[in-house]
Amino acid sequence: MTEALLLVTASIVTALAVLNVSFFLLAGWLAASYGLFIDANIYTLNTLILSIVVLACAGLITLFPAIDAYKTALHSSLSSTG
């Protein structure tokens, strides 16, 4: 479970960094070519809430295989002690 949460956290941080750099590098081109002005401030309360929801969902989903592995290990250890 820990490694899944670590991967999700690293993915969120990487995605936000790439998006921020992309906005910074492409802002002039988007404005000149398409008249599109995008605010580069993507770090808002909504972004934080969505990141927390994604982390919570990842934690919840990783519980299912962990519980199944625990049950299998428990059953195996109880069967072998006879």
Image (spheres, rainbow, N blue to C red):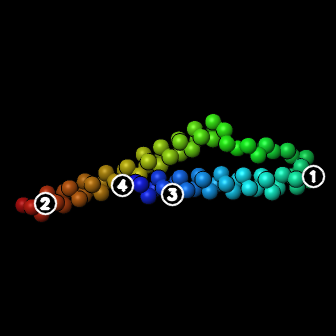
- Residue at x-position 63% and y-position 41%: 47
- Badge 4: residue crowd in 10 Å (few <14, some 14–19, many ≥20): few
The residue sitting at the right extreme is 32
Does dot 2 land on a helix, a strand or a loop?
helix
For the residues labelled 3 and 4, the Cα–Cα distance comes to 16 Å
Residue 71 drawn at (x, y percent): 25, 53
Left-right relation of 25 to 52 = right
Q: Nearer the viewer, mark 4 or mark 1?
A: 1
Identify the amino acid type marked 1. Ala
Does dot 1 land on a helix, a strand or a loop?
helix
Earlier in the chain: of badge 3 and badge 4, it is 3
Write down the residue under mark 1: 32
For the residues labelled 2 and 4, the Cα–Cα distance comes to 21 Å
Identify the amino acid type marked 3. Leu
For the residues labelled 3 and 1, the Cα–Cα distance comes to 37 Å
Tags 3 and 1 touching, CB below 8 Å? no
Write down the residue under mark 4: 65
- Residue at x-position 57% and y-position 56%: 11
Between 74 and 41, the one nearer to me in the picture: 41
